[in-house]
């Protein structure tokens, strides 16, 4: 089983729609979780950390479900500029972060 | 000012050649990394250095040798390049090696194509 798995998508949604997707992780001892955003042919950039109680950052909401070992990202009121690949990142042990292959979101006008 | 800069941006070379990629960060961070992103888009860590000391060395062929002359620089030298080495290589840095709390800052990547 891969350390971090994501639905690759793509998720094609109209502007203003809500889109949500999950990421599962294999190591139940993982403590830290993040969502990074990667635009085509660009470097990944941190979107948000994921806290145990769930957290919001504007139109973005992240949730953690430890029992089922997954995290989720929900994007409300999608904008064209939200089109990107969203990378799930999990701290596997000590200093190592493991990246998922990403979920591609395309927002259409 | 670019926070994490790596050069070259593109590198096209023949099989069997030796090449280097350079990385510099001006953020004052203690920890630097090399990641490889293959055609399937997985970002996999290759190496990590904390204050010039190697702390992560994943299962990477010996042909790959990182060098950190100081904590602001982490270069990657690759010997005897193979077709399978073709990928995008990202340098990154973080304030400390504690990945549980640290934001990674990535360079813009080096697209390596081995012909």
Image (cartoon, coloured by chain):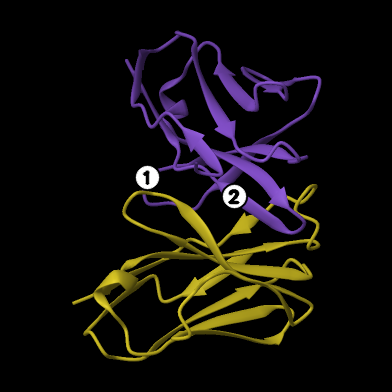
Residue A16's place in the image compared with A60, above or below, is above
Instruction: Choose top left, top right, bottom left or bottom right for residue B94.
Output: bottom right
- SS assignment at label 2: strand
Q: Nearer the viewer, residue A11 or A98?
A: A98
- Where's residue B31, x and y in %? 74, 68
Q: Chain of mark 2?
A: A
| Residue A98 numbered mark, or none | 2
| Residue A40 numbered mark, or none | 1
Q: Chain of mark 1?
A: A
Residue A109's place in the image compared with B13, above or below, is above
Distance between mark 2 and mark 1 Cα atoms? 20 Å
Instruction: Choose top left, top right, bottom left or bottom right for residue A11.
Output: top left
Q: Say which chain is purple.
A: A
- SS assignment at label 1: loop
What is the residue that sits farthest to the top in this orientation? A17
- Where's residue A102, x and y in %? 45, 38
């Amino acid at each position: 089983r891969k350390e971090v798995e994501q639905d690759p998508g793509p998720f094609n949604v109209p502007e203003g729609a809500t889109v949500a997707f999950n990421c599962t992780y294999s190591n139940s001892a993982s403590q830290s979780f993040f969502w990074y955003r990667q635009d085509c042919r660009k470097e990944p950039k941190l979107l948000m950390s994921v806290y145990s109680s769930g957290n919001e950052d504007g139109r973005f909401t992240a949730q953690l479900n430890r029992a089922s070992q997954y995290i989720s990202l929900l994007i409300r009121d999608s904008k064209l500029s939200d089109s990107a690949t969203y990378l799930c990142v999990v701290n596997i042990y000590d200093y190592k972060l493991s990246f998922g292959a990403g979920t591609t979101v395309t927002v259409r006008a | 000012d670019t926070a994490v800069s790596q050069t070259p941006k593109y590198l096209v070379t023949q099989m069997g050649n030796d090449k280097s990629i350079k990385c510099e960060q001006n953020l004052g961070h203690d920890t630097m990394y090399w990641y490889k992103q293959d055609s399937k888009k997985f970002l996999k860590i290759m190496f990590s250095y904390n204050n010039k000391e190697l702390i992560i060395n994943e299962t990477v062929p010996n042909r790959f040798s990182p060098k950190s002359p100081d904590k602001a620089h982490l270069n990657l030298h690759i010997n005897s390049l193979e077709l399978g080495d073709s990928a995008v290589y990202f340098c990154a840095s973080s304030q400390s090696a504690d990945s549980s709390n640290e934001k990674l800052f990535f360079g813009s990547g080096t697209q390596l194509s081995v012909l």
